[in-house]
Amino acid sequence: MSAQLSVTSAPGRKALVMQGMQASIAARVKAGVDLKSPTCIYGLCEAHNVAVRFNDINMEGMYDRTPKPRIHVSVLRPLARRTFTCAHELGHHVFGHGSTIDELREDQASSADRPPNEILADAFAAFVLMPTLGLREAFAKRGLDPNRATALDMYAIACNFGVGQATLVNHLAYGINMINQVQRDRLGRITPKMIRTELLGEVTSMPLTVADQHWNSPTLDIEQDGLLLLPAGVVVDASMLVPERELAAGRLFRAAKCGITRVVMPGTQWATYVRIARRQYVGLARFRHLEETADD
Ligand SMILES: [Zn+2]
């Protein structure tokens, strides 16, 4: 049966994941980012002098290795997916890989047959977006045992780090062994749509971002018309974040127009910049929150 061994054996895979993790630490240090906080991947790419462009391309993304390196990310994919793809392409950059095209993949696709460079880039992406120290802190301050956390708990933490629920759960299970297989399987059966339905009390196809009272990212990226669940007591600019209704878990808002708006909770440290981009905005990442001018 030896002929059926995959290209990357288990021990080889483990070494690649370690390399990916180490490179993620170096990339954060080089950009002056600490080793535990959630970080904006587009800002991190800028710090590494890699331009990021959103395109309506039918793939996850690509890395273009030129003297002026560039990452292309598909806007046809969900926001959290774009974040992970961008981090993955930055992984190709920091490892000095050549230009790469990443075809569409299922969220839960098996990674067993991935080539070594893809394992490296995936590991880099997971660790740079979800530093282990940051995840430990996220569970600790919410008073959660990772093996007992509910899907809603996991969703709030996934949103805080800008990744999808499945990405977080799989990294906790297979990347850093912070949850066991029983917990992974339990959470793996719960879709983002089921989580939205439980939180909102109705079925919606609109994306929902949850920022709970332990949210600690300085920025929150969302697209126009997207839904945002914030803790009760926040003060917002209602022309940008339109109040929708009160829920058991907080206040629900809808992102009304493009731009950057500060949200605070008076009397507390809780504050974040909500950055609203046009839906499926095509163009350079750094211009994604610019309001449309009357002319275009
Ligand atoms: Zn790749």
Image (cartoon, helix red, strand yellow):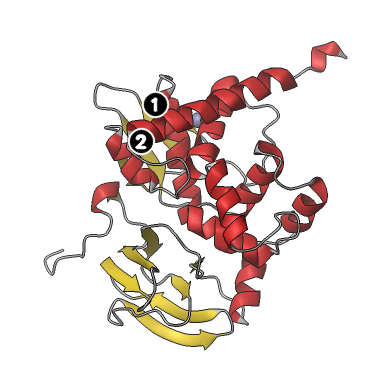
Query: Residue 126: percent from the left, percent from the top?
Result: 54, 39
User: Is 129 left or right of 237, judged from the image as shown?
Assistant: right
Looking at the image, which residue is at 60% across and 71% down? 196
User: Is 291 left or right of 1, judged from the image as shown?
Assistant: left
Query: Residue 27: percent from the left, percent from the top?
Result: 40, 31
Q: Quadrant of the C terminus?
A: bottom left
Compared with 13, 295 (above or below) is below
Q: Kindly report which numbered mark, 2 or 1, lies closer to the viewer in this rendering.
A: 1
Residue 59 seen in render: no
Cβ at disc 1 under 8 Å from ligand 1: no
Between the residue at mark 2 and the residue at mark 1, the CA separation in whole angstroms equals 9 Å
Q: Residue furthest right?
A: 1
Mark 2 vs 1, N-terminal side: 2
Compared with 63, 136 (above or below) is below
Cβ at disc 2 under 8 Å from ligand 1: no
Query: Residue 129: percent from the left, percent from the top?
Result: 49, 44
Based on the displayed image, in which of its 4 quarters is residue 226 positioned?
A: bottom left
Classify mark 1: helix, strand or loop.
helix
- Identify the residue position indicated by label 2 in the image: 71
Label pair 2/1, CB-CB below 8 angstroms: yes
Looking at the image, which residue is at 88% across and 14% down? 1
* Amino acid type assigned to the residue bearing label 2 in the image: Ile
Q: Residue furthest left?
A: 295
Based on the displayed image, in which of its 4 quarters is residue 17 positioned?
A: top right
User: Is 279 left or right of 17, judged from the image as shown?
Assistant: left
* Amino acid type assigned to the residue bearing label 1 in the image: His
Q: Which mark is residue 227?
A: none
Looking at the image, which residue is at 39% across and 73% down? 268
- Identify the residue position indicated by label 1 in the image: 93
Looking at the rendered structure, the number of numbered marks drawn on it comes to 2
